[in-house]
Structure formats: C-alpha cells, structure tokens
Image (tube, rainbow, N blue to C red):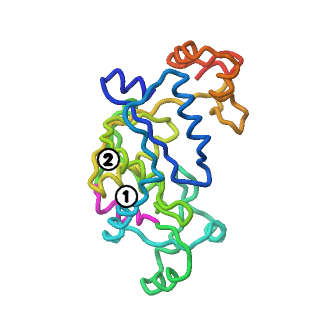
Amino acid sequence: MAHDVARQAGGRFLLRIEDIDSTRCRPDHIDGIMEDLRWLGLNWDGEVWRQSVRMAVYADALDRLKAMDLLYPCFCTRAEIAAEIAASGAAPHGPEGQLYPGTCRRLTPAQRQERLADMPCAWRLDMAGAVKRAGLLQWHDSVAGMVTADPMAFGDVVLARKEVAASYHLCVVIDDAAQGVTDVVRGQDLFTATHVHRLLQALLGLPTPRYHHHPLLVDAGGRRLAKRDRAATLASMREAGVDPAMLVARLRRGELPVGIAGEKA
C-alpha cells in the first residue's frame, strides 16, 4: 500500500531499515526484505537508510528532551515493575498493557545521581510534563479523519534502554522528518502509537505527516499472519513458484490466494 500511495501521488517510495535492536536484526533478514520487494516489483527511491548508523542523531534528541526536564532514568527491572503492580492490586492499562507505576519518577535528584553511577537504566518520558508542555495535539488519518492525540494513555513510555539506545517511537519521528516524509503508510496495529509520535513531533519541533493505517492481512480465522503461526512467507511463495504479479494484484484487492495463507485480508 505504501508503494501505491507514493506512486499515485507522484511521490517517492522510501525504504528504511529499522535495525536499532541488533539482537533481532540480522543481515540476512535485511537482504530478504530487499529480495522480497524486488520480486514483487516494488522499487524504492534513493538510498536505503539504516537506523543503526544514526544513533548519534537519536542521542542528540534524547539530550534535548533531558534539557527540557522531560526524561528521567528508570532503574526498575521488568520483574520489579510486575511485582509492584501486583502488590498494588490494580494498575491502569494502556494500549500496550499495564502502565508503568512511576516508581523511579519519585526518586530525588540525589538518589538518581547515586544510582546512575553504577546501575543500568532506561530513560522514560515524563508523560504528564510532556503533555502539559505540548498542549492539545491532533493528527490526520486517511480513514479515521482528524484524531485528537491522547499520549497519556501510554503512561511514561521508554525512549531508550541500555540494550537498545533509542526506541521505535523516537527513531521514526526523527527519521520521518529528516527524510521529508509527507505520508506515513503502515498497519492498523500501529495506529495507537501515533498518539505518542504526535507528542514527540511537537516536543522536538518536527513536522507532522499525514497517516494512512491500513487493515492487516489475516487468515481465514481472522488472525494476523505471523511466522509463529506458520503463515506463508514471501520467500516460501517465491520458492513455490507463485506468480508475483498475480499475487500483487490480489493483495491490492484485499485477497490472498487460497491455499497459501487464508482467503481474505
């Protein structure tokens, strides 16, 4: 869909490799993405950007947010967070599950400095402070229309970790602006993330693209196609001799060939 939106508007179709998590992104995976696109006849414009070489840019953005006093270090482990939530008897839920209870937000400056000296940490966005600073925000989706951003529903999101120095939320808004992206086309599963992205755009003085969140491909039972559920991959279809032009035509109609991965998208 992203390819078609770009071509129909006379724009550029960009390929960006979002490989900030080195434990999950391997060179063969990246090669596979490019091979799949070429097989489908979907050609991209310009150089391929890789987020793994742009970590200094993301670090600069984090420093800017720290200078606004909108980030704080979080030293909690996942087990400690789960234990605190369990002990409280109840915890607010957001689009991504239970919200962080704010344990490290309550540390004093002296306690933070002491722990920073010898403890790994994540950096969380002080959501209440960020929303207060940014004010009322909106963004436009091609299906939902004008949407009022509600980033508070996510709580104090993590923007950097020890093992992953910048989050998806932070990287994509920076790169969208740097690449001059006017239209973001992605799956409906990322619709709610746009609330956080709109906030980060406002805080960092970045432009807001138009958004197009399309339905996900699902199997006959309505389940999202995924490797863990043994859904067919493009590579397996290619090896099976599937006609790529026919496959693309059916995908554009919201269909999947019977016998490959369900009947309807």
Query: Residue 83's spot in the image, x, y percent?
Result: 66, 70
Query: Residue 45's spot in the image, x, y percent?
Result: 38, 31
Q: Quadrant of the N terminus?
A: top left
Q: Earlier in the sequence, mark 2 or mark 1?
A: 1
The amino acid marked with disc number 2 is Ala
Q: Which quadrant of the figure has residue 256?
A: top right
Q: Which quadrant of the figure has residue 80?
A: bottom right
Q: Main secondary structure of the magenta part?
A: helix
Q: Which mark is residue 35?
A: none
The amino acid marked with disc number 1 is Val
Q: Is residue 50 magenta?
A: no
Left or right, 64 with respect to 123, comes to: left
Q: Residue at x 54, y 14 (%)?
A: 245
**Is residue 80 placed above or below 172 in the rendered structure?**
below
**Is residue 214 placed above or below 262 in the rendered structure?**
below
In this view, the residue in front, 100 or 160, is 160
Q: Quadrant of the C terminus?
A: top right
Q: Is residue 127 magenta?
A: yes
Left or right, 121 with respect to 200, comes to: right
Q: Which residue is mark 1?
A: 57
Q: Which residue is mark 2?
A: 178
Query: Residue 26's spot in the image, x, y percent?
Result: 60, 47
Q: Mark 2–mark 1 contact, CB under 8 Å?
A: yes
Q: Residue at x 46, y 63 (%)?
A: 156
In this view, the residue in front, 246 or 203, is 246
Q: Which residues are magenta?
A: 124-135
